[in-house]
Image: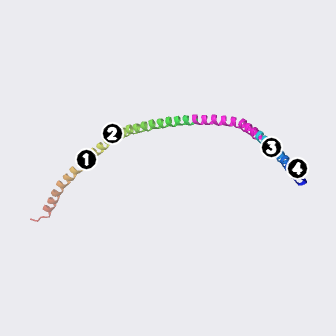
Amino acid sequence: MSANGELSLGIIAFAVVILAIVQVLTLIAGIRLVRRVEEISIELDRDLKPLVSNLTVLSTEAVRAASMANKQIERVDHVFGELVERVDHTLAVAEEFVTGPARQGMAIVAGIKAAFDAFNGLREVSRRRSAPRAAVEEEESLFIG
């Protein structure tokens, strides 16, 4: 082999050694990265488990609270429905209580008014009857005969 061949072979060997070292360093860095990712994963898992369990408890409580609120709303709706029915019934009874005597009172007032009108009508008739006699007597007194 010639000197140039040995030099080329030496450079190739040196390059292979350098590539091997770079590959080993890359492998070591990859292993460190995998370990770090695993540590972060374990840490996240440890930190997130209580959070997830708390969220589960909170969502369960929220569902229970919503269910209870729904039941309370239904109860309030039922109570107000009964209240409206009772108020309507009470108003109907009160209206009947007031309008019944009011109708009777209006009938009595109408009867009294009719009686007064009849009495005034009789007075008017009697005035009309007496008015022509007075006019006849007055005319007779004016008559010269």
Q: Residue at x 28, y 46 (%)?
A: 110
Mark 3 / mark 4, whichever is N-terminal = 4
Where residue 32 sits, quadrant-wise, is: top right
Secondary structure beneath disc 1? helix
Marker disc for residue 10: 4
Q: Is residue 4 magenta?
A: no
Q: Nearer the viewer, residue 119 or 101?
A: 101
Residue 100, numbered circle: 2
- The kind of residue on which mark 3 rests is Ala
**Residue denoted by label 3:** 29
Q: Position of residue 102 (x, y in %)?
A: 34, 42
Label located before the other in sequence (1 or 2): 2
In screen coordinates, is 1 left or right of 27?
Answer: right
Relative to 3, is 70 above or below? above
Which tag, 2 or 4, sits closer to the chain's start? 4
What segment is highlighted magenta in the picture? 36-64
Q: Amino acid at mark 2?
A: Gly
Q: What residue did someone put label 1 on?
A: 114
Residue 48 magenta-drawn? Answer: yes
Q: Are marks 1 and 2 in contact (CB under 8 Å)?
A: no
